[in-house]
Image (tube, grey):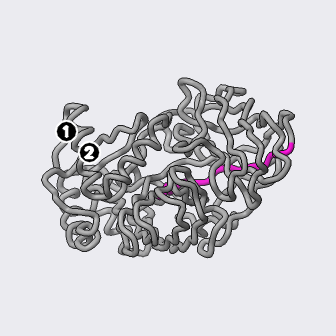
């Protein structure tokens, strides 16, 4: 495994490796989706080494050069290669992500019953090309997610919320970490974002008045960049709930929030909504899956106020806050695509106690409803 020193060469090789493994179209959509991202890099699964997509749509990190595997090759030979790779990592790496001293520590934890498995099966909605859809309102496993409460209180989501993966927190002081995901998709070229759903609220769409929001999330609320629960990367999105919006042009403006540095009443740049937006899509412009923040902000702690520029007579809209865990490419249809959380860029990313794990379909390549199924594995230590 080699580290590419020069930024331009590193980005070029990371993109090339990604295209070979997960497909050019998926890489291009991911890059476009991250063009205006403000938070920290997000891991890209299924690429040998440690590859992240950063703001601006660049791909950076350590990659294993010299591989000529396609996505199908990775699926077919993953088990044998992963075993060899983990041994190699144990020799080359002194410390995995917080919680594990090395490969032996990971194997020990898994062998004494600290692995957890979370199956999922989601029958996705019809979408819009290059627009992101939410899988929160679809089932069957986990079941259809609960509706966030109306403003001002809203809902702080956790693993007890209907729609989240039910799991028991590890005994203190253990922490839980992503190890592996097996994802099947009925349509090729999609990309799932696995994220922790932190908070949601339902404003009155048929109003132009300012609407106060008093509820707050319970995770990722630190203002310290080095803290595991730093608010950097927390993102806001607006989702159409169970009723499509009326044919009314509207913007989300003026909305106020508290940023990652604890500055209150920051003004969210105006976000253009969509007349007649269908259920489960994000009420965002094409290609945009997160609401922009004020210049210099890298995360959102909570909302202070929501406001619409025009009254939308009918329809349901939700304001939701999440924290990204990883992009999960689904390059091939009707086959299990394995995402390795040890040797790829995840490097055993932590899953916080009480997390409410959920999925977004990032900038769908087609309108076709997609069925997803698979298994997520974590290990505690």
Picture coordinates of residue 373, whole percent (x, y)? 49, 73
> Going 53% across and 32% down the picture, which residue do you hit?
298
Check contact, mark 2 vs mark 1: CB within 8 A: yes
Instruction: Classify mark 1: residues with Cα within 10 Å, few (<14), some (14-19) or many (20+).
Output: some
Between 72 and 339, the one lying in front of the other is 72
Q: Is residue 4 left or right of residue 266?
A: left
Between 202 and 223, the one lying in front of the other is 202
Picture coordinates of residue 297, whole percent (x, y)? 56, 28
Q: Which residues are magenta?
A: 192-206
Q: Which mark is residue 4?
A: 1
Magenta segment, principal secondary structure?
strand
Q: Is residue 43 left or right of residue 158?
A: left
- Distance from disc 2 to disc 1, alpha carbons, whole Å, reads 9 Å
Mark 2 element type: helix
Circle 2 is placed at which residue position? 14
Q: Is residue 192 left or right of residue 304?
A: left
């Amino acid at each position: 495994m080699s580290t590419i020193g020069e930024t331009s060469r590193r980005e070029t090789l990371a993109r090339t490796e990604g295209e070979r493994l997960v497909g050019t179209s998926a890489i291009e959509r991911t890059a476009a989706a991250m063009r205006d991202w403000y938070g920290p890099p997000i891991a890209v699964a299924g690429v040998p080494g440690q590859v992240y997509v950063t703001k601006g749509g660049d791909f950076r990190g350590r990659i294993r050069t010299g591989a000529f595997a396609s996505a199908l090759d990775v699926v077919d030979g993953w088990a044998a290669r992963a075993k060899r790779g983990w041994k190699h990592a144990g020799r080359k790496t002194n410390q995995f992500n917080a919680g594990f001293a090395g490969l032996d520590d990971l194997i020990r934890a898994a062998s004494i019953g600290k692995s957890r498995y979370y199956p999922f099966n989601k029958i996705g909605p019809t979408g819009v090309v290059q627009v992101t859809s939410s899988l929160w309102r679809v089932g069957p496993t986990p079941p259809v997610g609960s509706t966030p409460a109306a403003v001002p209180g809203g809902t702080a989501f956790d693993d007890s919320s209907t729609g989240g993966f039910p799991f028991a927190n590890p005994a203190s002081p253990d922490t839980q970490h992503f190890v592996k995901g097996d994802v099947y998709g009925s349509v090729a070229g999609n990309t799932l974002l696995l994220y922790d759903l932190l908070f949601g609220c339902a404003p009155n769409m048929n109003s132009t008045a300012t609407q106060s929001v008093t509820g707050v999330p319970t995770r990722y609320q630190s203002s310290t960049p080095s803290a595991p629960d730093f608010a950097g990367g927390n993102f806001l999105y607006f989702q159409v709930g169970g009723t499509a919006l009326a044919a009314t042009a509207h913007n989300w403006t003026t909305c106020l929030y508290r940023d990652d540095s604890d500055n209150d009443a920051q003004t969210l740049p105006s976000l253009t909504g969509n007349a007649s937006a269908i259920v489960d899509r994000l009420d965002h412009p094409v290609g945009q899956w997160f609401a922009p923040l004020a210049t210099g902000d890298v995360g959102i702690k909570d909302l202070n106020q929501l406001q619409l520029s025009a009254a939308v007579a009918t329809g349901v809209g939700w304001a939701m806050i999440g924290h990204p865990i990883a992009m999960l490419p689904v390059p091939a249809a009707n086959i299990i695509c394995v995402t390795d959380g040890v040797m790829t860029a995840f490097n055993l990313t932590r899953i916080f106690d009480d997390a409410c794990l959920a999925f977004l379909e990032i900038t769908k390549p087609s309108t076709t409803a997609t069925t997803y199924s698979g298994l997520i594995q974590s290990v505690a230590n």
